[in-house]
Image (spheres, helix red, strand yellow):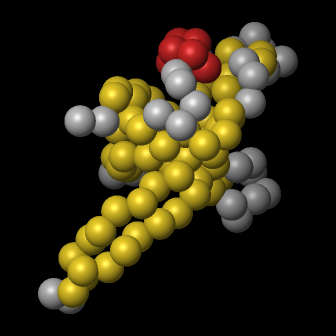
Amino acid sequence: MNQLQFVAQICERDVLRYTPAGVPIVTATLLHSSQQMEAGLARLVEFEITALAAGEISGRFSQAELGAVHQFTGFLAKKNRSSKSLVFHIIDFCAAA
């Protein structure tokens, strides 16, 4: 299974654009910071990840407030066929509690 869920801040976002096939798409950078337990010790975990919202969700994502913290659900995929870089594909998101 390839499913990822985490809380992150929208720190950068491009404008809504369309693929050659006419699919609406928005790319962004998400910033995550949390404390996690590992081997009985608290560990600070921070990362930035490139994210992509395509299709129906892209309209809602393009209107989300920059700097706002949301819970994101999605999956990881290669940036393109020949790339080793991963991109987080947003399936859904909601305001973090």
Q: Is residue 88 above or below residue 84?
A: above
Q: Nearer the viewer, residue 32 or 89?
A: 32
Q: Is residue 35 above or below residue 76?
A: below
Residue 1 image point, x, y percent:
34, 51
Q: Nearer the viewer, residue 54 or 94?
A: 94
Total labels drawn: 0
Quarter where residue 71 is shown: top left
Query: What residue lies at 78% left-to-right and 57% top-to-bottom?
Result: 82
Query: What residue lies at 23% left-to-right and 36% top-to-bottom?
Result: 97
Residue 36 image point, x, y percent:
27, 71
Residue 73 image point, x, y percent:
38, 38
- Can residue 89 be seen? no
Residue 64 image point, x, y percent:
52, 22
- Can residue 23 be seen? yes
| Residue that extends furthest to the left in the rendered view of this protein | 40
| Residue that extends furthest to the right in the rendered view of this protein | 20
Q: Is residue 85 above or below residue 77?
A: below
Query: What residue lies at 70% left-to-right and 49% top-to-bottom?
Result: 79
| Residue 70 placement, left or right of 51 | left
Quarter where residue 62 is shown: top right
Query: What residue lies at 46% left-to-right and 55% top-to-bottom?
Result: 32
